[in-house]
Image (cartoon, rainbow, N blue to C red):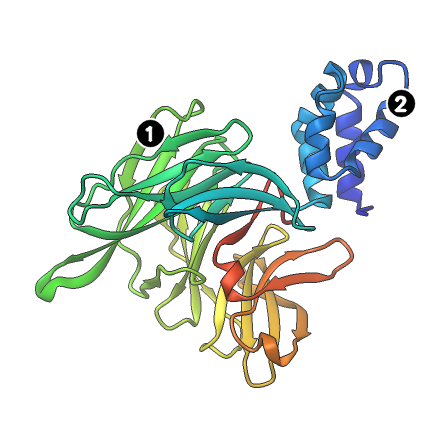
Amino acid sequence: MASSLLVRQELEVVADPLGVVANDGVLPTDLLTEVLLRVPAKALCCFRLVCRSWRLLTSDPCFARAHSSRHPLFAGRCYVEDGEYHLHIFDMSGNIVKRMCGLGDHTTHLSTHADLVCAKRRTLEDGDDGLLRQDLLLNPATDAIHVLPDVSIRSSQVTTCYLGRVPSTGEYKVLRVVQYYGGRGAEVMFAYEVITLDASMQSWRVRVAPDPPATGVLPYKRGMLVIREVAYFFSHGVDSVVMLDLETEEWRPSIVQCPPMNRSAVALYRLKGRLVLQNHNTDDCSMDLWFLMDVDKGLWTKRYSMHCGPNWKNHLYPLVVLDDVRETSCRNRLATSTIAFGTNAIQ
């Protein structure tokens, strides 16, 4: 169980404002909080029905952050039948905490932030190729499904969405990478739409960001990701990281040089709330995880190295670093449809 100063501070913040209503004179709030923090997410959902005070305590954002630091949740798609997929929220033991149905055929890419999931749905309706493609924002807690605005580029072929949030304003922003054909010779081009959501998630503002800097970027899975208000991309040479600021919706002028590594097997991930560069050496079946500690100084620290068996030679992906510094990883078949989920799920 987590025993860090961060978690202890979260407990104090949770216990103080709810002290009057949360214990009902039976248990001290700090003790009740500690007990409920040890309960798995699926059972905790049932405990919210016990009484009003328990519902208030377990619904508090500080409690949610403290609980998710001990019980990371993941979002993954599950095929049902006839092209229908469900979204499953499950814990580290594989227990399904929540299901969202009726999503049609949604693609493997999922992006999450806090308690929201960004996904894509394809249905057999009107479209140039008989398919209607929609980018969705899902709220598993309320079962709400919000359809994002249509792509502004008519000739778009592929879109991939990444969800972020600007701490200073509290706004959720979706970065939509649009692949299309344009220019001479119908070359493949990319546009970067920033979709801003209001607090009600009923109103949207769409802006196309300027072209990337001269270094170019690789806007593909495992070559980009969003952490809070910043989108990170590998440069074309995979020797540096380029950043798009979602708050200003402009590219940052500075870049971050990558550490020495084998550039043929690298990827970007988010672990412990930081940008992490994964360097996978297939020759000796090992994986190094480099954490970006200081963006301004371009300081990377290699925190973890792990060796794996021969069955893990290809497509090894980190999912989460647990409190006791163990690492959980999985292969490509599962990792492409599974992503860490929940408020502050990766600490």
Q: Is mark 2 on a helix, strand or loop?
A: loop
Residue 306, quarter of picture: bottom right
Residue 264: x and y, percent? 45, 78
Residue 242, quarter of picture: bottom left
Which numbered disc, 1 or 2, marks the residue that appears first in the sequence?
2
Whether residue 134 sits left or right of residue 296 in the image: it is left
Residue 10: x and y, percent? 75, 35
Residue extending farthest to the bottom is: 283
Q: What element carries label 1?
A: strand
Tell me which residue sits at (53%, 57%) in the image: 295
Q: Which of 131 and 52 is in front in this view?
A: 131
Tell me which residue sits at (49%, 66%) in the image: 267
Q: Give the residue at mark 2.
A: 28
Q: Give the residue at mark 1.
A: 204
Residue 316: x and y, percent? 56, 69
Whether residue 306 sits left or right of residue 337 in the image: it is right
